[in-house]
Image (spheres, rainbow, N blue to C red):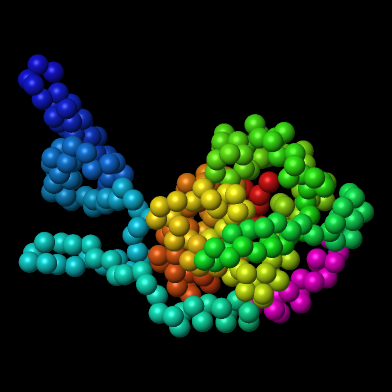
C-alpha cells in the first residue's frame, strides 16, 4: 500500500491468485461479468488466460442493447463487434398482425368453453362481475380496456394500499410493479386461475381487436407505464403482448427494471422466429407456474 498505487497493487495480487486457481483446475472457459474499471489489470489477466489456452468471454455493461444479429468483423486487423440497426421493415409488422389474427381467432373459439366454465365458477365463488377490466397503456400511447377473468374480490383496487407491505420486491405500490404472494384479495377460484394463467384467456379478444399482440412487452396499468422513462420507452412503439420475455423468464419474480430490460431487448431483436419461440416457451412457463401469484 506504500508504493503510491494501491489499486494497481491489489489488482495485480488478485489477478495472480485468480490465474493460479484457474491453472490448477479443469476450467476451459472464463467469463468476465465485471464493469470495465481497472482495464489494464483485466487486459493482463485476459492475455494470460488466452495464452493458457482458455476461452475468454465478456459480458457488456448494458447487455440488453446487443442485437441477436451481432457479428464479429475485422477492420485493419482490429476485431470489432458489429450490430445492425434495429429498424424493421414495415412488412414485418403486417406479418406479425396476420399471425396474431390467424392464431387468436381459432384459439378464442377453442377456449370459449373453458372461459364459460370458469365464469360460472367465479359467479358461484364470490359476488361481483365475471370479467375484470382495467385501463392499460397500449401502442403509441393509446390506452385500452384490458380484459381478464376476475380473480380478486370486488373493490380490490381500492384496498391495494392495505397490502402494500406485501410487495415481493419491497417497493410498495408507488414504484415498479406491485406483486404479492398470498394476496388476501385473491379469491379461492382466482388463485387456481392465476396459477395456470387461465385468467388471461379473455385477452385473446384484445388481440383480435388489435389492442394487443400474442407476443410483446407486458401491458402495464397506465399509472405504472408513467414510470417507464429513457430508452425503455421504445416498448410503447409496439403492441403489448399476452406473453413475452417477462412471462417466460419468471413473471412476478422479475423486478420492474429487469422487466424493462427484457422488453427493450425484445423490441430491438424482434423477429417472427423469436415470437414463435416465446409462444412455445410460454407453454412450459404456464405448466411450471413460476412467478404466478
Q: Is residue 17 left or right of residue 220?
A: left
Q: Is residue 223 left or right of residue 23?
A: right
Q: Residue at x 83, y 70 (%)?
A: 113
- In this view, the residue in front, 172 or 106, is 172
Q: Position of residue 26 (x, y in %)?
A: 28, 44
> Count of labels shown?
0
- Visible residue check, residue 135: yes
Q: Position of residue 19 (x, y in %)?
A: 19, 37
The residue furthest top is 2
**Does 238 lie within the magenta span?**
no
- Position of residue 176 relative to residue 105, above or below, is above
Q: Residue at x 45, y 57 (%)?
A: 233
Q: Would you say the magenta stretch is mainly helix, strand or loop?
A: helix
Q: Is residue 3 left or right of residue 13?
A: left
**Does 107 lie within the magenta span?**
yes
Q: Quadrant of the N terminus?
A: top left
Magenta residues span 103-118
- Position of residue 184 relative to residue 84, above or below, is above
Q: Position of residue 250 (x, y in %)?
A: 56, 50
- In this view, the residue in front, 144 or 166, is 144
Q: Residue at x 54, y 66 (%)?
A: 139
The residue furthest right is 124
Q: Position of residue 178 (x, y in %)?
A: 62, 43
- Visible residue check, residue 168: no
Q: Residue at x 57, y 34 (%)?
A: 170
Amino acid at each position: 500500500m506504500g508504493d503510491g498505487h494501491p489499486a494497481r497493487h491489489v489488482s495485480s495480487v488478485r489477478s495472480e491468485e485468480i490465474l493460479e486457481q484457474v491453472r490448477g483446475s479443469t476450467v476451459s472457459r472464463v467469463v468476465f461479468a465485471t464493469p470495465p474499471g481497472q482495464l489494464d489489470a483485466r487486459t493482463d489477466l485476459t492475455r494470460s488466460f488466452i495464452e493458457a489456452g482458455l476461452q475468454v468471454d465478456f459480458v457488456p455493461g448494458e447487455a440488453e442493447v446487443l442485437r441477436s444479429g451481432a457479428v464479429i468483423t475485422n477492420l485493419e486487423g482490429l476485431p470489432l463487434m458489429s450490430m445492425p440497426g434495429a429498424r424493421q421493415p414495415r412488412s414485418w409488422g403486417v406479418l406479425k398482425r396476420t399471425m396474431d389474427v390467424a392464431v387468436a381467432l381459432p384459439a378464442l373459439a377453442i377456449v370459449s368453453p373453458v372461459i364459460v366454465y370458469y365464469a360460472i365458477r367465479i359467479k358461484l365463488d364470490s359476488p361481483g362481475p365475471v370479467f375484470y377490466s382495467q385501463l392499460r397503456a397500449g401502442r403509441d400511447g393509446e390506452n385500452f380496456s384490458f380484459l381478464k377473468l376476475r380473480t380478486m374480490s370486488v373493490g380490490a383496487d381500492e384496498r391495494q394500499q392495505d397490502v402494500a407491505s406485501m410487495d415481493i420486491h419491497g417497493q410498495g405500490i408507488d414504484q415498479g410493479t406491485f406483486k404479492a404472494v398470498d394476496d388476501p384479495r385473491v379469491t379461492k377460484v382466482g388463485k387456481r386461475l392465476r396459477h395456470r394463467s387461465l385468467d388471461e384467456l379473455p385477452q385473446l379478444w384484445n388481440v383480435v381487436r388489435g389492442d394487443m399482440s400474442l407476443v410483446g412487452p407486458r401491458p402495464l396499468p397506465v399509472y405504472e407505464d408513467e414510470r417507464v422513462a429513457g430508452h425503455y420507452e421504445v416498448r410503447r412503439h409496439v403492441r403489448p403482448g399476452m406473453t413475452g420475455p417477462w412471462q417466460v423468464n419468471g413473471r412476478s419474480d422479475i423486478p420492474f427494471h429487469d422487466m424493462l430490460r427484457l422488453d427493450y431487448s425484445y423490441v430491438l431483436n424482434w423477429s417472427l422466429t423469436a415470437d414463435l419461440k416465446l409462444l412455445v416457451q410460454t407453454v412450459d412457463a404456464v405448466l411450471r407456474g413460476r412467478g404466478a401469484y
